[in-house]
């Protein structure tokens, strides 16, 4: 038993009622939708009634494509669907959650389309959160990853400073996790090798969320901040730090490697 394939995105569209894309960048998404033999190359007629893009891209691109889809007409009207709709539905959880079927989908678009797609999304993940209109799923994703990056930098900086001043990372982690500094980066994804098992820092920062992907998402956040003239100094600082880590050859290592490669933090047994 196998899955049938098509040679082009347009060929996939012509054979699908629901279509899901998950691609590396905005340029890839635009090419799949608007490029030669793209999903929208059939003029203003579309076969799929529901298109879901789970790529992590800028909100402006999500909104542009959603507007293009909304102008199309369904090739065959089915049930209560009068026209095709699009949802932007990026995910949180990474490879581990994808394999375990525990992804969280952050969904932007019409609420009716979200409700219609919810059961499909829950077949791939455990949580769905409706974020509002078109592009808001993409907004949620880049803001979530921005907060995650800044949090990891703060925890890594504090742990590295603590080591330099003579306190062990495990002791400082215990203090963080029983006080106001507690956060995901300290209690679930600790960046110090030797402090926590089952996280990338325990396996030389392999697996997890690559630094190059964090740099990409921070670039999306920085560009979006500039577009709306929002002051986001930590966004630009985080973007700079993770870009430097990638330039130094650590782009494939988990983003928590910032503790070792930027702050020169030490493994617990070497501290």
Image (spheres, grey):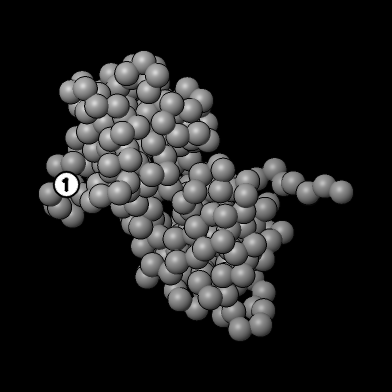
Please tell me in which quadrant of the rendered image residue 191 appears.
Answer: top left
Where residue 249 appears, as percent x and y from the top left, is: 39, 17
Element under disc 1? loop
Regarding residue 146, the answer to whether it shows in the image is no
Please tell me in which quadrant of the rendered image residue 62 appears.
Answer: bottom left
Camera-side residue of 259 and 94:
259
Look at 42% across and 44% down and name the residue there: 188
Image vertical order of residue 163 relative to residue 188, above or below: above
Look at 47% across and 22% down and name the residue there: 204
Q: How many marks?
A: 1
The residue labelled by disc 1 is: 232
* 158 with respect to 120 (left or right): left
Regarding residue 229, the answer to whether it shows in the image is yes
* 95 with respect to 142 (left or right): right
Where residue 256 appears, as percent x and y from the top left, is: 38, 32
Camera-side residue of 94 and 216:
94
């Amino acid at each position: 038993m196998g899955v049938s394939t098509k040679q082009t995105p347009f060929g996939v569209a012509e054979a699908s009622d629901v279509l899901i894309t998950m691609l590396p960048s905005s340029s890839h998404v635009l090419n799949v939708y608007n490029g030669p033999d793209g999903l929208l190359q059939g003029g203003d007629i579309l076969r799929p009634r529901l298109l879901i893009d789970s790529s992590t891209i800028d909100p402006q691109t999500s909104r542009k494509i959603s507007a293009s889809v909304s102008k199309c007409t369904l090739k065959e009207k089915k049930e209560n669907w009068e026209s095709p709709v699009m949802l932007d539905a990026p995910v949180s959880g990474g490879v581990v959650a994808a394999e375990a079927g525990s992804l969280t989908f952050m969904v932007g678009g019409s609420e009716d389309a979200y409700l219609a797609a919810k059961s499909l999304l829950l077949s791939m993940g455990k949580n769905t959160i409706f974020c509002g209109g078109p592009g808001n799923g993409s907004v949620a994703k880049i803001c979530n990853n921005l907060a995650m990056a800044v949090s990891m930098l703060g925890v890594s900086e504090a742990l590295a400073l603590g080591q330099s001043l003579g306190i062990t990372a495990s002791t400082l982690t215990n203090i963080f996790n029983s006080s106001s500094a507690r956060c995901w980066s300290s209690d679930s994804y600790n960046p110090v090798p030797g402090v926590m098992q089952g996280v990338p820092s325990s396996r030389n920062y392999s697996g997890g969320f690559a630094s190059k992907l964090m740099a990409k998402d921070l670039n999306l956040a920085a560009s979006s901040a500039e577009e709306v003239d929002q002051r986001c100094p930590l966004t630009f600082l985080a973007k700079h730090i993770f870009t430097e880590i990638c330039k130094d050859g650590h782009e494939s290592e988990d983003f928590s490697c910032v503790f070792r490669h930027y702050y020169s933090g030490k493994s617990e047994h070497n501290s």
